[in-house]
Amino acid sequence: RHSVATIQEIANLMLLRGNIGRPGAGLCPVRGHSNVQGDRTMGINERPPVFFLDALEKRFQFKVPRDNGHNVVEAIHAMAEGRAKVFIALGGNFAQATPDSHRTAEALSSCDLTVQISTKLNRSHLFHGKDALILPCFGRTDIDIQANGPQAVTVEDSFSMVHASNGQLQPSSKQMRSEPAIIAGIANATLGKTPVDWLWLVEDYDRIRDLIADTIPGFKDFNERVKNPGGFYLGNAAGSRRWNTASTRANFKSNALPLNLIHEDISSTGQIPDLIMQSMRSHDQYNTTIYGLDDRYRGVKGQRDVLFVNEADIIRLGFQPGQKADLISIWSDNRERRVKGFTLLPFDIPAGQAAAYYPEVNPLVPLESVGAGSSTPTSKFVAIRLERSAESARII
């Protein structure tokens, strides 16, 4: 809930110490994993900046919609309320990655159409609308050959470096298409050659990059610069001590200390949480993809349905280490959010705190519980209580 303010205070501290712009001493703000950095740079944003919309209008000569879109939580609400009827996923595992899993599944199922553009099957394909499509696409490791020959996509990393990425593996089917080809096909079927010739563009991805160079700041001569070994550096204003503020100086951001860390929708229930739980990932995991059931970071082997708890808390709550418990989150909407049969694992963790693996405990995160200023689910602060599981035998 207070994540934005927390990050701002960390930035304040770095400014006070003079760390911003000092080699080896600054911040590394990460907008997400993999190419999520580049997505934002390319304008993929539910609230795109005005300069980006103006640039699109100028280059492509059409009236760009100015209404805001939906972030993830807003999109789930919109589907559940019938305000959004079509869901198109360009990759990802939406149903598994999102909070309040049962409500998310219901929201997806209420759509008229769901489309999954995917490199492989995943659980989200099971929660679909009245009509549903699964469109298999190349992964970044697949060889991508279009009309003008082999193609490379471009990606941006956490350090503002943009480089080309070429696949090396034969696609598993000749019927598969690349993501750009699928998007271009949908656009062509819907709009024809307006405002661009979509099918011509996708014949050679250099043509797409030329349009990016015309539209996005910092991408002049995109195709030439990306040929350099390692790509090119987009730059970072703060790293160069250039402050893009009204005063042209670095600005501090003050935040009042919260009077209570517990959300009103938790305290209003009258229930006192047994523990405050955060979700996290294991070593053998990448996002929602779980490669194995071991976690060498924390000494866990062969299981994921565990709750890391201070041993004193386990005893305080009337349990024994290794006993199984159901986890129930506390919120004011009278919905029961429960996951069953989690093994209580004593761990070196502060008293009153607990941790469990994502996405197994996503069903416990209320859809309405989001960070102030970010609208991201509060997966690091979930108030829970424990009940003995029907099968509560100790297993450790």
Image (tube, rainbow, N blue to C red):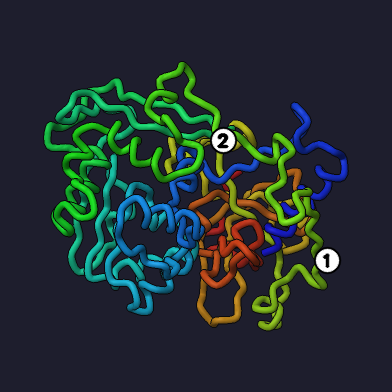
Identify which residue is drawn at 66% across, 38% down.
Answer: 28
Give the side of residue 61 with respect to residue 262, left or right: left
The secondary structure type at the circle numbered 1 is: loop
**In the depicted view, which residue is nearer to us: 327 or 121?**
121
Q: Which mark is residue 158?
A: 2
Q: Which mark is residue 102?
A: none
Identify which residue is drawn at 60% across, 61% down.
Answer: 374
> Residue 125: x, y in percent?
28, 54
> Residue 60: x, y in percent?
31, 52
Amino acid type for the residue under numbered disc 2? Ser
Residue furthest to the top = 229
Identify which residue is drawn at 40% across, 38% down.
Answer: 213
> Residue 376: x, y in percent?
56, 60
Q: Is residue 292 visible?
A: no
Does the residue at mark 2 contact the one at mark 1 (Cβ under 8 Å)?
no
**From the viewer's perspective, is residue 204 above or below residue 115?**
above
Give the side of residue 291 with respect to residue 314, left or right: left
Q: Is residue 354 visible?
A: yes
Please give the residue where the numbered disc 1 appears in the rendered image. Answer: 257
**Mark 1: few, some, or many residues within 10 Å (few <14, many ≥20)?**
few
Amino acid type for the residue under numbered disc 1? Leu
